[in-house]
Image (cartoon, rainbow, N blue to C red):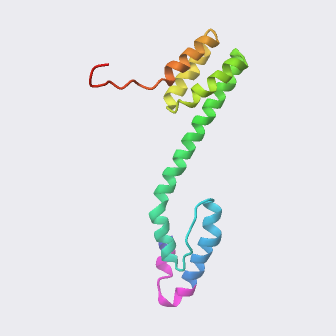
């Protein structure tokens, strides 16, 4: 992008800079960034600066979305396996307990516990233990 901006920097290239900016804003970027609202841009340097200002934020958002999708998929798989192993009642009780757990390491540990649990009650006990928030020590020691 920077090379294109530099290549078209001469004043007589202003119509090409505008054409590229319009194309980026109306065609290229909307196809690659669905759901991202963009203000109309009239010069290629505006496109360059907009991308430079936002690409890290977008990347972080996409990473977080991917992580959450991965956690949700893991929860779904654990629930399905619990259904197959211990029946629908245990699976239904598992779902809200699994929903409280976001740490990938805990979800991985629970996958092991699902295989090692002798019955549905032991599995649910493991879920409850992993899902309980860490107690915060109060100043009065309780």
74 sits left or right of 51 in the view: right
Closest to the observer: 35 or 141? 141
Query: Residue sitting at 49 percent across and 31 percent down?
Result: 103
Q: Quadrant of the C terminus?
A: top left
Query: Residue sitting at 57 percent across and 19 percent down?
Result: 112
Vertical relation: 86 (above or below) 4:
above
In the rendered image, residue 86 lying in the magenta stretch gets the answer: no
Farthest front residue?
A: 140
Percent x, y of residue 57? 47, 56
Query: Residue sitting at 70 percent across and 21 percent down?
Result: 83
Percent x, y of residue 27? 65, 70
Percent x, y of residue 133? 45, 26
Range covered by the magenta-colored residues: 4-15
In the rendered image, residue 14 lying in the magenta stretch gets the answer: yes
Q: Which quadrant of the figure has residue 100?
A: top right
Q: Which quadrant of the figure has residue 108?
A: top right
Percent x, y of residue 60? 48, 51
Vertical relation: 140 (above or below) 23:
above
Farthest bottom residue?
A: 12
55 sits left or right of 119 in the view: left
């Amino acid at each position: 992008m920077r090379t294109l901006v530099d290549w078209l920097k001469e004043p007589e290239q202003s119509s090409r800079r505008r054409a590229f900016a319009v194309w980026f804003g109306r065609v290229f970027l909307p196809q690659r960034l669905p759901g991202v609202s963009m203000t109309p841009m009239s010069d290629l340097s505006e496109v360059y600066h907009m991308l430079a200002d936002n690409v890290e934020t977008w990347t972080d958002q996409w990473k977080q979305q991917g992580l959450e999708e991965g956690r949700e998929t893991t929860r779904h798989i654990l629930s399905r396996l619990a259904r197959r192993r211990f029946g629908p009642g245990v699976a239904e009780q598992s779902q809200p307990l699994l929903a409280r757990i976001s740490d990938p390491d805990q979800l991985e540990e629970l996958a092991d516990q699902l295989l090692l649990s002798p019955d549905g009650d032991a599995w649910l006990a493991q879920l409850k233990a992993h899902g309980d928030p860490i107690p915060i020590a109060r100043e009065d020691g309780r």
